[in-house]
Amino acid sequence: MKLQRGKVLVDPPASASSDIAFILIIFFLVCAAVQPETGISQVLPKTEEKKDKQEQSKNLEVSITPTSIVLNGSPLKLPEFAQRLTAALKQKTRDADKIVTVKSSPDTPYPLWIDVSQTIKEAGGILTLELESDRVINVE
Amino acid sequence: MKIQRKKLTASVPAFAMGDIGFLLLIFFVILARAQDDSHVQWQPAKLEEADMVAASLASVTIDTGFKTYLDGKELSNDELAGALMTILGDAPAGQRNVFLKVHKEAKASHFEPVIAAIGEAGGDLIHILEPDEQTK
């Protein structure tokens, strides 16, 4: 004859539930705090007034619109722009000649601007922004 | 004749300590979240070569409504350079990181004045972007 064992249900003590919640919150807080950011860095020297137009005209000029990238007057697509820019910058030896002046139309989307600035950086150029208010800032 | 009163001792029940700690924690969490910019709504642009970046002294965000925030507080582009100068103070070069979080649909008219303000304040600009897994 088999003896039936009485089933014993073990509940965690209710007074410990707040401690469990406390530990869980600490865990999620630490997880959220250590989530790393990703991106790209650019060094921005101080904003300066626009220099002599003649001095600037020696540098490469890039105009960005939502539909095109214009390098020294030639409209190009991004891969072609990268090739042409790399070739143009290879000929330049002085840092001062590697300045690339970028003028964006007001409706230029951010992802396109980032792609162009990254292409200039990879090609060895020194990015300079020409803003609508005639202020010029250099980006290395 | 004086009647001596019985001294009553009132003690906090020990089992309530967990609950008190929990409520204090919630309070400090809400306080901390009010000071950061996690409530600002924005979506990062994607870039193939987005790397891990160092910590920053300040964070500038352009949200889905193309408003500018400095460490979670809304302010105009004209006020941004001055506010950043105050935060960056005399921090040496290389330790003046400023995160720029731009909503992916923002246009040059929104983000270029912000970049100019960061440059004016002498900040080291870091664009916060999402690594593009599809092009890898």
Image (cartoon, rainbow, N blue to C red):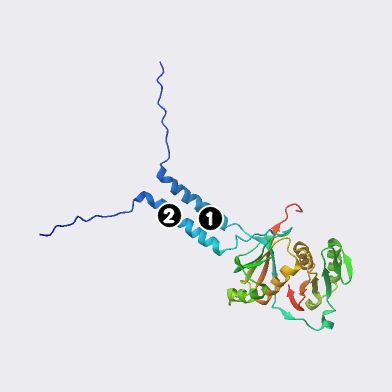
Residue A117 in sight: yes
Q: Position of residue B39 (x, y in %)?
A: 60, 60
Mark 2 = which residue?
Answer: B21
As shown in the figure, which amino acid type bears the numbered disc 1? Leu
Q: Position of residue A9 (x, y in %)?
A: 42, 33
Q: Position of residue B60 (x, y in %)?
A: 64, 67
- What whole-number distance in Å separates the C-alpha atoms at marks 2 and 1? 15 Å
Q: Residue furthest right?
A: A74
Say which of A81 and B119 sits in front: B119
Q: Secondary structure at mark 2?
A: helix
Residue sitting at x 47%, y 51%: A22
Q: Is residue B13 left or right of residue B117?
A: left
Residue sitting at x 83%, y 71%: A62
Q: Write down the chain letter for disc 2.
A: B
Q: Position of residue A99 (x, y in %)?
A: 79, 75
Q: Secondary structure at mark 1?
A: helix
Categorize mark 2 by other alpha carbons within 10 Å: few (<14), some (14-19), many (20+): some
As shown in the figure, which amino acid type bears the numbered disc 2? Gly
Q: Write down the chain letter for disc 1.
A: A
Task: Check if mark 2 and mark 1 are on a common chain.
Answer: no
- Decide: is A50 above or below B106: below
Numbered mark located on residue A44 in the image: none
